[in-house]
Amino acid sequence: MSIKLVLLKSGEQVISEMKELVSGEKVHGYVLVNPHKVQSNRAIVLTEEDSVVQDRNIEITLSQWILLTDEREILIPKDWIVTIVEPLKSIVEMYQEKVNE
């Protein structure tokens, strides 16, 4: 199992340990273990000229993906996943600290 960042059809970004659900040689879905929603907030500053300047600092928050359950493993059909990528090392560390609290 490895930690991945998943972009869902809903537009949500979820970080999670992932396992593939395979039948034969075909992937049918994924199991997300301890999934957390990743939200980023970028600071925006307005100047007198009404032009927008974006600060390069991004605030990242992680929250339990589905709040109203105690389940740690959640099945996702493969057609709900837009893409799967390797998260930044700093985000992986943040996720591991949060999950291991």
Image (cartoon, rainbow, N blue to C red):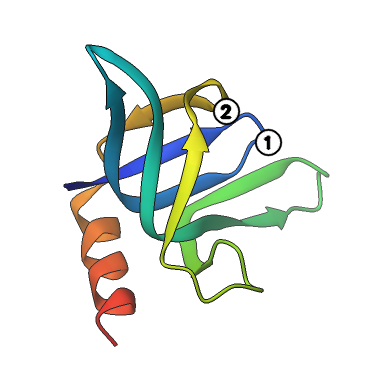
Q: Residues within 10 Å of mark 1 (few under 14, many from 20)?
A: few
Give, as a three-letter code, the residue at label 2. Trp
79 w.r.t. 7: above or below: above
Q: Is residue 39 above or below residue 27?
A: below
Question: Is 1 displayed left or right of 40 in the figure?
Answer: left
Check disc 1 and report its element: helix, strand or loop.
loop
Q: Position of residue 24 (x, y in %)?
A: 23, 14
Name the residue at 49% across, 64% down: 59
Residue 53's disc is none
* Residue occupying the point 55% across, 57% down: 39
The alpha-carbon separation of the residues under discs 2 and 1 comes to: 8 Å
Q: Amino acid at mark 1?
A: Ser
Q: Look at the numbered discs 2 and 1 and tell me whether their residues touch, using CB distance below 8 Å.
A: yes
Is residue 67 rendered to the left or right of residue 27? right
| Residue wearing tag 1 | 10
Apparent side of residue 70 relative to residue 18 in the rendered image (left or right): right
- Residue placed under numbered mark 2 in the picture: 80
